[in-house]
Amino acid sequence: MANVEHSGRPTDAFGPAEPGARLRAARLALWAVAAILAVRQMTVVLTTPSGRRLTDLETWVGPHGVLHVNGSLYDSTRFTGTPFAGLVLKPLTRSAQEALGWSWTFGTLLLVAALGLVAARALPQPVSRRTSLLAAPVAVSLLMLSLPVRNTLWLGQTSIIPVLLVLLGCFTVRGARAGGLCIGVAAALQPTVLLFAPLLWFTGRRRAALTTVGTFAACTVLAWAAMPHDSYTYWVHHVAGVGLGGPADGIANQSLHGALLRLGLAGPVEITLFLLLSAAVAALTLRRAADYARDGQLLLAVAITGCAAVAISPTAWQHQLLWVLLAAVGRVGKRASDRYVWPVAVILVTTLPAKMMLPNMPALYPLRDDLVLLMALAAATVVPFLRRTSPYYRTPVPTQYAPRVPARFRRVPLLPFLRRVLTRPNLLLELLLIRVVYAAYSQVRLAATGGSSTGGRFTAEHHGHLILGLERFLHIDIEYGANHAVVKIGWLRDFFDFYYESFHFVVPLTVLAVLYWRRPVDYRWARTSLGFATFLALVGFWLFPLAPPRLMPTLGIIDTVHGVQDFSKPDYGTLTALTNQYAAMPSLHFGWSLWCGLVIAIIAPKWWMKVLGLLHPFCTVSAIIATGNHWVLDAVGGAAVVTAGFGLAYLFQGPRAAVAAASARPAPEPERLVVAGTR
């Protein structure tokens, strides 16, 4: 959650210049990370019992796979490749299954590494020396983390090969015929890759385009001659593979066809609409891609053409969506701080499940189900990528920094480069990070007791007795008395129940929103301290699962919020299936409220505002104890993590910069000069 933003100068893309030794050390460290990720992926696949890994490969070439049997490859609809792909894979049926699993997985990892190297070398010029040295390990690491690659490794798929062949044909092999040959073979394996032939034609590589079409036709005819019945089934009966591999309306199918089916359309209406939308997407994308290719951004042109191929394909399964990740090379935004929004969004969408990107709300299900498709369509048709001729391409509007405030300690801040930024951060980037961090917080909170709200119940109740004993020793065990006193007063009970359920998220989000709009410098400081506090709380949930008073069977605490407790099954209420009921220590209910109160007390200009702000943690601590949801010591723990959060923010970044956003002058925009010899 710490703030790191750069000035946007070309030589500062990775911060100030460093000695060669540091750059080499950083490069080695990044390659080590890529190697660790590769080993981890291979270990996860190969240590999983047979039958649960490489399932597609087993379906194709296993002892009872479709490539062994007589008749059509597509009788069971389990084989999704083209007849040419079946012809290429058929020799693998003679391989020993155990050896094939090892060699297939290791070979796929090598293909991923090659893909990352080719993509890194294809970055639009000019690039700094740091970028050229660090791009390859970063690209390989991101590929290893992406869902398409992980699914490809897990299933034993071939979807890496067409992407690599296209990149080789566009950037690596010499000669138009060799490049067209590579792309034509890729199209024979994945027919929508033929969309690259018009791109080659419109960018002046007409011989390569003709070779692509010819190679595709030759491979298809070869497969038709060798397997005429299979070819007829695939190309005619299934209309280029439609309906193979699973229901076309399944969430895994991230194409326009799948999205229209999920919306309830069917029959001729759906087919007509799909064809019209596909034609429009293809035409718009090819025009944009040709412009970016002529602008010197061929990798971006290839990436958005691949995104269009994903959208217009009848079926685009998750392991085929690698084109979306390559679209992260495009630059979007005039400000240096805006440059991170697009690549961060692409990386998050391609590496995290969709349920972590959007809240679990029925109204958002259509967006969540088609999130990758929407990202592919946005990249292909609407995202305003900067051209190299733009004055902002190499020199974005620089970030403004607040004057450094002297600290009381000599070595504070520990990280001087984390300077206080004056300008307001990008809202979309903030929302993305807040959503992902909260989703991760929810997952860790749930996993702290073994992945369910009932896991670790014995340990949590044992810790509850320890806390109760300590409170009795300290004479602060007021939970029972406060709970029963409040239960007798109806209006007070209703007030605390409402306060407990309603203000936990509303007040912190409101404080963040007001600070973001009115006090951006203070927003960054407050957001950073809240992030540190929440992280420390997660550590507490993990190390010390604790049952709240309402889940302690012998205490007689009345659960005023959720109702009568069934101790044989402590899972009830609206959210108990989604949250860890034994994440009581420290109390983030009180911790977040204390954070709100302190931020308001520090920043608010009026004394009565400060008092109102401090009333919120007082009401919260009263509510969590009166409703039986927390111990007194839970509130102490919440106060401790919030104090530590502010302390860490001070330690890493130094004192808060007391500079109002309104006093900041806008940074001058770079002069609009066109360099001679460029467009």
Image: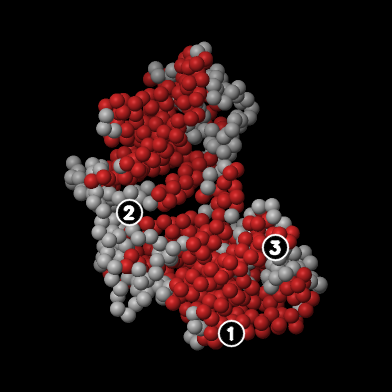
Residue 4 is marked as 2
Left or right position of 454 against 471: right
Q: Image height check: is 540 above or below 402?
A: above
Q: Quadrant of residue 17?
A: bottom left
Structural distance between the alpha carbons of marks 2 and 1 = 48 Å
Residue 306 horizontal/vertical position (percent): 55, 69
- SS of the residue under disc 3: helix
Residue 383 horizontal/vertical position (percent): 46, 62
Which of the two labelled residues, at mark 3 and mark 1, occupies the earlier sequence position?
1
Using the image as rendered, state which of residue 141 and residue 319 is in the foreground: 319
In the image, what residue occupies the spot 55% across and 57% down? Answer: 374
Amino acid type at circle 2 is Val
Q: Are marks 3 and 1 in contact (CB under 8 Å)?
A: no
Left or right position of 160 against 264: left
In the image, what residue occupies the spot 32% across and 41% down? Answer: 518
- SS of the residue under disc 1: helix
Callout count: 3
Q: Quadrant of residue 243?
A: bottom right
Residue 607 is marked as none
In the image, what residue occupies the spot 39% across and 31% down? Answer: 593
The residue carrying mark 1 is 210
Which of the two labelled residues, at mark 3 and mark 2, occupies the earlier sequence position?
2
Q: Image height check: is 418 above or below 217?
A: above
Residue 271 is marked as 3
